[in-house]
Image (cartoon, rainbow, N blue to C red):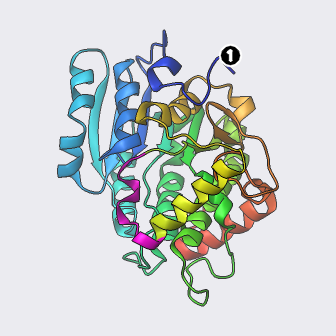
């Protein structure tokens, strides 16, 4: 891993001196925040990027800077409609990419929602689990043949995985009382476990997968939070600060840096099957600390296999 990279490293610092001409990437969630910055940085360094978004009109407006970077250099950018809360939309988007046939050097599953009021996807799944995990699970597995040998998959998890493990018996909160942060934490744990099992299944082709904690960033991700959910987050941050752990919000370029690092310049052997933060492999910790570290249950290989099987059953497809 590159020396000097850390919590304040930006995307352009990660890619300083790196030419991505000839490389092709897919980034989900390019209508705001981290997704837009991730796409911009890759395109600015010569890459071809496909950006997926639910609302194409919003994404067109949000990615003006990405298009400008493409026009001023050798990179390119195009949009793909993808609603992760609808399996029909996921299948249609994957089918379009498969029919196109062009390969990807890495897929970055960046899109997500956070601490939403209780809701259901178009297919009846708990909204956060269905959108953040199952939508990406189906999409990424369907397009996995398009990832080049030696390519990478990067899935965005979160320090909020500390809030909750995934309940494999009730992932959709059908009998468990709903709590927005518990549901978000469970979905982010699922994102980490998905990367663990994807890495195991695809490393024979040299493809490595990792999950990423981008850090605390003020983006649109929290737009659905109720006052109660916001108060819970504020209390958690205050508790970290009071215990001496510290907490500092990142800029968007700092928040996107670990995703870009993992997808492009990190040593694949070091990051494969791991949870990453601040442009390095995170420390495993036994106690709750939303600010740093990964809980053992988010890297548990046996639970990752069980979640894979559960997810296949829920989406009705096997991979």
> Is residue 220 found inside the magenta-colored segment of the image?
yes
Q: Nearer the viewer, residue 253 or 73?
A: 253
Residue carrying label 1:
3
Residue situated in front as seen by the camera: 175 or 100 = 175
Q: Is residue 170 above or below residue 166?
A: below
Residue 300 is situated, as x and y percent measured from the top left of the image, at 79, 57
Is residue 110 visible in the rendered structure shown here?
yes
Residue furthest to the bottom in view is 175
- Near mark 1 (Cα within 10 A), the count class, few <14, some 14-19 or many ≥20, is few
> Looking at the image, which residue is at 39% across and 23% down?
47
> Which segment did they paint magenta?
218-228
Q: Quadrant of the C terminus?
A: bottom right
**Quadrant of the rendered image containing residue 306:** bottom right
Residue 161 placement, left or right of 232: right
Q: In which quarter of the image is residue 223?
A: bottom left
Q: Where is residue 164 in the image (x, y as percent from the top left)?
A: 67, 67
Q: In which quarter of the image is the N terminus?
A: top right
Instruction: Specify the farthest residue to the front.
Output: 242
Image spot of residue 29 (x, y percent): 37, 49
Report whether 115 appears left or right of 164: left
């Amino acid at each position: 891993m590159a020396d000097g990279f850390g919590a304040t490293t930006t995307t352009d610092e990660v890619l300083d001196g790196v030419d991505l001409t000839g490389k092709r990437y897919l980034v989900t969630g390019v209508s705001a925040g981290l997704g837009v910055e991730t796409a911009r940085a890759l395109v600015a360094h010569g890459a071809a990027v496909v950006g997926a978004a639910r609302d194409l009109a919003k994404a067109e407006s949000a990615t003006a800077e990405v298009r400008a970077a493409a026009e001023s250099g050798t990179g390119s950018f195009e949009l793909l409609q993808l609603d992760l809360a609808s399996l029909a939309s996921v299948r249609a988007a994957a089918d379009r990419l498969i029919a196109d046939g062009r390969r990807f050097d890495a897929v970055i599953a960046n899109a997500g929602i956070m601490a939403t009021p209780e809701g259901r996807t178009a297919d009846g799944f708990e909204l956060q689990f269905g959108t953040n995990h199952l939508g990406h699970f189906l999409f990424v597995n369907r397009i996995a043949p398009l990832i080049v040998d030696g390519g990478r998959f990067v899935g965005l998890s979160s320090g909020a995985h500390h809030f909750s493990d995934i309940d494999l018996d009730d992932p959709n909160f059908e009998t468990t009382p709903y709590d927005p942060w518990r549901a978000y934490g469970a979905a982010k744990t699922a994102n980490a476990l998905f990367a663990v099992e994807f890495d195991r299944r695809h490393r024979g082709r040299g493809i490595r997968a990792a999950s990423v904690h981008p850090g605390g960033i003020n983006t649109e991700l929290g737009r659905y939070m109720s006052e109660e959910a916001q108060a819970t987050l504020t209390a958690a941050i205050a508790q970290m600060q009071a215990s001496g752990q510290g907490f500092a919000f990142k800029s968007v370029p700092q928040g996107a840096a670990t995703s870009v690092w993992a997808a492009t310049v990190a040593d694949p052997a070091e990051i494969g099957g791991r949870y990453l933060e601040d442009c390095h492999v995170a420390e495993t910790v036994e106690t709750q600390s939303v600010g740093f570290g990964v809980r053992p249950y988010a890297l548990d290989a046996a639970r990752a296999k069980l979640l894979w099987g559960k997810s296949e059953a829920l989406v009705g497809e096997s991979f």
